[in-house]
Each structure stands twice: as structure tokens, then as C-alpha cells.
Amino acid sequence: EPEVTQTPSHQVTQMGQEVILRCVPISNHLYFYWYRQILGQKVEFLVSFYNNEISEKSEIFDDQFSVERPDGSNFTLKIRSTKLEDSAMYFCASRQGMSGNTIYFGEGSWLTVV
Amino acid sequence: AQTVTQSQPEMSVQEAETVTLSCTYDTSESNYYLFWYKQPPSRQMILVIRQEAYKQQNATENRFSVNFQKAAKSFSLKISDSQLGDTAMYFCAFMESSGDKLTFGTGTRLAVRP
């Protein structure tokens, strides 16, 4: 069964460093997402991406965050200057097309900022 | 803005028994989608079941079924014949029919006892 894959599974970084989280969405999917889950809290929407541009973003997704689809398969989330409060599980997700189609999640990238 | 409420932070059930997890939501939309996701200790987000609001029939997936009460804005998950592998965090989630993002509840931690 096709799945969303994410790398790395776990990354530890120094505060102030740049981090890039990578994702390969399901191949025939058109909509891509990043969600975040701080330990012990609920999953929060960060950003959605369609047709090579951001379609919606949350208040969390400030100027320190950016997303990119550099080629036909990868979808990346960059955090320019990490803060301690960026420590969280970051989930990439995708869906095929029509509104209401199920959103499928990757296994997550656990980011620890020290 | 939509909100999703899961009033049971933790639940416990004996193996082979049935358990029901509660979820309520608030929206002014008439058409939308509701989901239950499972997050086992591995922290992957796995889709359990999905319901379309315009369908009166409750969704069913093997041992998992929902009780969708649109007027009451209630969307509970019933797990029959509970198995040890059902031990996980369960998140209820909402998506507008014209929308592009999931709004999650705070989750219910389910423990299945042998």
C-alpha cells in the first residue's frame, strides 16, 4: 500500500540552527501538508500546499518556516532558526484530490531542539 | 472556527470487550467530514474510519464503527472485540467539505487490558 515517507525519523539540533525535514508524499497525491504535535498535546495544522504554492497556513507558520517542493517527489519543511519551543513531532501528510479525500500521514519526524 | 472536543482523556477496556470513545464538534457548516485516527506508541497517525456528514448511514470498518448524530454534533467511535493492539491514542478530527485542513481533538488514550 502506498505511504507517505519522512526523513529523518529523529533529529537533534542546536537552538538557532536550520533544520530541513523531508517528505515523499504518495505519488498520485496533489495536496500536501505539515502538521505538528508537541509532546502530550494535540496535532496542529501548520501549512497546506497545492500547485506549487501555499494554499493555507496557520498562525504557527511564521517567517521562520518555509515549505518547498523542489522536484516531482519531495516536499520539505525548513525551520530557519530553531527555538526550544519548536521541539515536536512533525507530520507530513498528503491527499489525492477532491475535497474530503482522506489525508494520509507519514510516520513523523521527531525534532529535539537543545 | 471549528472545534473538536474529546472529553475522555483516558479509557481502559478488557480484551475482547467493547468500548466507546466520545467526540463532539462545533461547526456552522452543513457538509463536512469526520475522522478517527489512531496513534500507537510508535506515534504514527493511522486512519481508523471516516464519515461524510451528508450520509446518514454510520461508517463501519471491521471491528470499528461510529455513531454519528448530526443534530447533536456527536461522533463516537465503538471498538468491538478489543485487542491488545488497539492500545493507542485516538484522535477525532473534523474537516470542512470545502476546506483543506484537519482540526483535531485532544485525544483519548485507550489501554486494552489482557
Image (spheres, grey):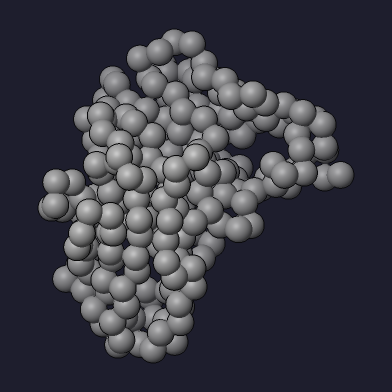
User: Would residue B106 be found to the left or right of residue B19 on screen?
Assistant: left
Is any part of residue A113 visible from this angle?
Answer: yes
Q: Decide which of B69, A101 is in the foreground and name it.
A: A101
The residue at the far top in this view is B56
Q: Residue at x 61, y 34 (%)?
A: B21
Is any part of residue A56 visible from this angle?
Answer: no
User: Would residue B68 be found to the left or right of residue A35 on screen?
Assistant: right
Q: Decide which of B102, B70 is in the foreground and name it.
A: B102
Residue A34 x/y as whole percent: 32, 56
User: Would residue A46 be found to the left or right of residue A10 on screen?
Assistant: left
Residue B3, picture quadrant:
top left
Answer above or below: position of B56 versus A73.
above
Q: Residue at x 64, y 48 (%)?
A: B88
Answer above or below: position of A98 versus B37.
above
**Image quadrant where one finds the C terminus of chain A:** bottom left
Answer above or below: position of A29 versus B53.
below
Q: Residue at x 18, y 46 (%)?
A: A50
Residue B105 x/y as whole percent: 46, 44
Answer above or below: position of B66 versus A75.
above
Q: Decide which of A33, A7 is in the foreground and name it.
A: A7
Residue A14, picture quadrant:
bottom left
